[in-house]
Image: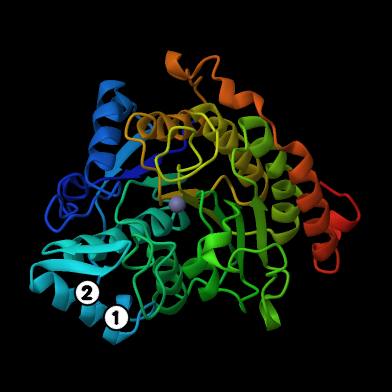
Amino acid sequence: MTTENLIGIIVDDDFASKHIPPYPKPSFISFENPLRIKSILNHLERINIFNNNRIIKVKPRDVTQATMELAHSKYHIEAIKRVSNMGGGLLEEDVFLTEDTYALAKKAIGGAIEAIEGVISNKYTQSFALIRPPGHHAFREKASGLCIFNNIANSILYLRNHLNFNKKIAIIDIDDHFGDGLAQYFYDDSSVLYFSIHEFDFTEGDLGMVDELGIDEGIGKNINLPVPEGITNEDFYYCLDLLEPILNEFQPAVIVVAAGFDMYYADPIGNCSLTSIAYNQFADKILKIAESVCEGKISFILEGGYDIIGLPYCVEAIIKALLKEKYEPPDYENNLSVLENSKRKEIDKIKTFLKSLLYPYWDHLKLNIK
Ligand SMILES: [Zn+2]
């Protein structure tokens, strides 16, 4: 790879201004609000990212109803449109709708499609879709957990069905939560690998457990690494060493990262202890793997991440790794005591168990090949 690869950043002002949680009436507070994108964009402007000649700003694609129907039932699409037209409301505890939710959620799908298709078609080598609402909890039939439509699943189904792109795709989900919606779309599909590291949360039922391996053709291609709350940067990096043998063996044509940043230590929803440097190290690692297996093709799609002070730094940390420029974390992240409480022992147990479950399906893990 040359150092001249382009990076597409998918932006649209609507993500920074629309779909505002209906606070204070009805009484509902959501951390999933336009300030997330506003704070990222302000920060990227402040550090002059968009003046870099390797960065290009791109708009989301237009999305048709037919494209949305690849991932969602007509009833679900219609329901979101209907409630938006009525002025909004709460669909369930974690799903708020406003008058502009339908249009923005549709635009978010278009942002993810642009990000992934742009990489596949060599418009740019890597991309980052700065979109909201997030998508990885959305199901074919319903919105869930702040997610309206499943941006990543819809993009992949669009590539498969409308663009005839049939090569293998790896999804790496680093959001604090298990992407229950996203995993279900490809649970029986051997051409899409879903790998998720997430905080194990008993209140969410059984989803995201270590022995959910996929089914039928897809067995072994759903990989869950549930981690205890409070994991540190070091713990997170230690989890990532599973990625190299698996991606080397799988040989995807593109890597899609479900880029959630709610494992950040100050996140109001997640309970982990990462700082922005963890995301810099993650991107650096995934870039090296991508350069050896898929010509560096990676697409980052924003999912969760709700600390509006830290979130912009986490995004910068990733972009700097893609640019191969040094990332300097903010001073306030230095010497945090949260970083000292390693969960290494618990993680070791889970990792060993996960590996033993995966041995029948992954020679590289079994034979210890990188
Ligand atoms: Zn999350």
Local SS, label 2: helix
Residue occupied by mark 2: 80
Residue that appears at 79% across and 44% down = 348
Above-or-below relation of 215 to 159 = below
On the image, the x and y values in percent for residue 228 come to 64, 46
Q: Is residue 323 left or right of residue 206?
A: left
Residue that appears at 28% across and 41% down = 36
Tell me the amino acid under the disc marked 1.
His
On the image, the x and y values in percent for residue 311 come to 38, 35
Residue 49 versus residue 35: which sits nearer the camera? 35
Q: Quadrant of residue 63?
A: bottom left
- Residue 76 marker: 1
Local SS, label 1: helix
Tell me the amino acid under the disc marked 2.
Ile
Above-or-below relation of 351 to 286 = below
Q: Residue furthest right?
A: 367
Residue 344 versus residue 161: which sits nearer the camera? 344
Q: Residue furthest left?
A: 86
Callout 1–callout 2 Cβ contact below 8 Å: yes
Above-or-below relation of 70 to 61 = below
What separation in Å lies between label 1 and label 2 (alpha carbons)?
A: 6 Å
Above-or-below relation of 46 to 101 = above
